Image (cartoon, rainbow, N blue to C red):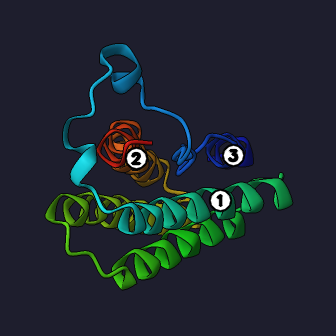
Amino acid sequence: MHTRFLTALLLSPILGLSINAASPSLAQRATGAESEAAIASPEQCSQIIAAANQAVQNVQTVTQNNPSGDAESLLLIADVADQAIATMQLIDLSDTQLQGYRDRFVTMYNSTSQASRNLVAAVRARNEADAQTAYEMIVQATADEGPLVEAVNGYCGS
């Protein structure tokens, strides 16, 4: 496994979609739908959006400050995911739909953290098969990010 692999991984947006708290979602623009957004708590939506956006900003900071893409950078991204888990779990939500979204973020961040640490261990052990498996786990862990962000934006009326 070469450093280029880690550089490519770090420069790709592992947690890199930002939730937009200001503009209408694509679904709302296309249909003009108000749907469930009217019942979403704006304060609770803002808390989830802020936590998710902070995670994105922290990952971007890591990738900008560590362009070499070394293993330590990937461990920092795992730490960012762990911080995001803690932040999300501290948000008090009465809205069951938002609780579900939060749980999905927590699951994604947890899987990303574990897979990132596994990737570092595999690279350090020079085990390309395990590194590939860990990389695939990261891709799988973050595959739901786009749809999750769209769902939160749609539900919160963002």
- In this view, which residue lies farthest toward the left? 96
Q: Which mark is residue 59?
A: 1
What distance separates the C-alpha of mark 2 from that of mark 3? 23 Å
Task: Return the x and y of residue 74 as percentages of the image width and height.
Answer: 62, 63
Task: Return the x and y of residue 88 as percentages of the image width and height.
Answer: 40, 74
Task: Determine whether label 1 and label 2 are within 8 Å by CB.
Answer: no
Q: Is residue 99 left or right of residue 25?
A: left
In this view of the protein, can residue 93 be seen by the observer? yes
Q: Quadrant of the C terminus?
A: top left
Which residue is pictured at 35% across the width and 58% down the height? Answer: 108
Q: Is residue 59 left or right of residue 22?
A: right
Above/below status of 70 relative to 87: above
Among numbered discs 1 and 2, the one appearing first in the sequence:
1
Task: Determine whether label 2 and label 3 are within 8 Å by CB.
Answer: no
Q: Amino acid at mark 1?
A: Val
Q: Amino acid at mark 2?
A: Thr
What distance separates the C-alpha of mark 1 from that of mark 2? 13 Å
In this view of the protein, can residue 118 be seen by the observer? no
- In this view, which residue lies farthest toward the top? 30
What residue sits right under mark 3 in the picture?
A: 2
Which residue is pictured at 61% across the width and 45% down the height? Answer: 9
What residue sits right under mark 2 in the picture?
A: 142
Few, some or many residues within 10 Å of mark 3 (<14, 14–19, 20+): few
Q: Is residue 57 left or right of residue 22?
A: right
Q: Nearer the viewer, residue 38 or 126?
A: 38
Which residue is pictured at 18% across the width and 58% down the height? Answer: 97
Please tell me in which quadrant of the rendered image residue 60 appears: bottom right
